[in-house]
Amino acid sequence: MSRGRRWTNRQQGDFLLRLGRLLEQGYSLPKAISILKLHQNRWMQDGLQRVYDCLKRGYALHEALANENFSRDVLGFLELSEKHGDLRFSVMEGGKMLQKKEEMKGRFIKAVRYPIFLFVVVLCICFVLFRMLMPHFLSLYSSLDIKFPYFTMVMISILKKIPFLFFMFAAFIVSAALLYFTFMKKMSPSRRISLLLRIPVLKRTVIVLITHQFSIQLGSLLKGGLAINEALKILEQNQYMRFFQTEAALMKKELVNGLRFEDIVAQRRYFVPELSMIIAHGQSYGSLGKELIAYSEILISYAEERMAKYIIVVQPVLFLFIGSMILAMFVSMLLPMFKMMDSIQ
């Protein structure tokens, strides 16, 4: 097993892309690994040395990288290609897949980081103002026999409950995490996917990602010259993709029963509807493998566009919420002052 630090998705993606380029230049797998060891951090050199040793002992690449805790999606993809596919293509695509995932995650974090920081700062200011200043105002107003405006009293009541609300929020996050690890992890992949598809916000994204994975995995096998039934058999044997293991077995049975492959795919609600049309078109022209790979690239571009739309929506909503909080804070502070001035007159 691996020791030391864990590879991040970005580091995994960079490594796979560099490895793929060396393989395209004609280097053997062990030789490419030994070259990539140069000019790396010590812990990464140790990891690549373990990968190199595994390869020299006859292990497959996916087995060597599994010991370094690489992404299971990439490991499954590599296992398929090492059996009946183009390893160089799979290594490069695995690297691109991880890099795109990290890019989308980075863009989303960058978009929400400043608004969240601003929200926390404003919340702290509100808390200090209403905890430190408001008691003095309360004593002053009570001595003058002036009552706080209703809106200000509501704000004070809310801010007094902030510690409790934070505690409840933290308890919710911890409970959700425990629920996930105790129940979701024990669920079958099919059951887990069905549950995710019931969440409206996640449904479309989950469908696109599942279709992308299925398309690129099946496409790479078909591109290598396998028939659909043979490709499904290999998917069924993949140890890293439990969801596709089950689905490939069911699809094989339905093919044996005489159903057309495009009809089988059309029945699955976790695939985008267009996938069945792509399959029908690819089969009619004898280029199903290439068309599935091309379609997988379209899907990942679509996922990036959806992420960009989410960011466009999330940022203004967060800023609007923060702006409303600031406005409410100042209004609640100013209203008592106006009331006091009226009483003095």
Image (spheres, rainbow, N blue to C red):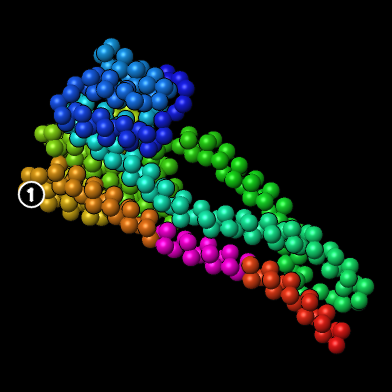
Q: Quadrant of residue 62?
A: top left
In the picture provided, is 329 more to the left or to the right than 292? Answer: right
- Which residue is situated farthest in the front direction here? 39
Q: Does residue 311 belong to the magenta stretch? A: yes
The residue wearing badge 1 is 284
Principal secondary structure, stretch drawn in magenta: helix
- Above or below for 16 versus 197: above
Q: Quadrant of residue 336?
A: bottom right
Determine the residue positioned at 73% across, 75% down.
Answer: 334
Determine the residue positioned at 59% across, 45% down.
Answer: 173
Q: How many marks overall? A: 1
The amino acid marked with disc number 1 is Ser
In the picture provided, is 208 more to the left or to the right than 171? Answer: left
- Above or below for 313 versus 34: below
Residue 219 pos. (x, y %): 19, 40
Which of these two is toward me, 75 or 316?
316
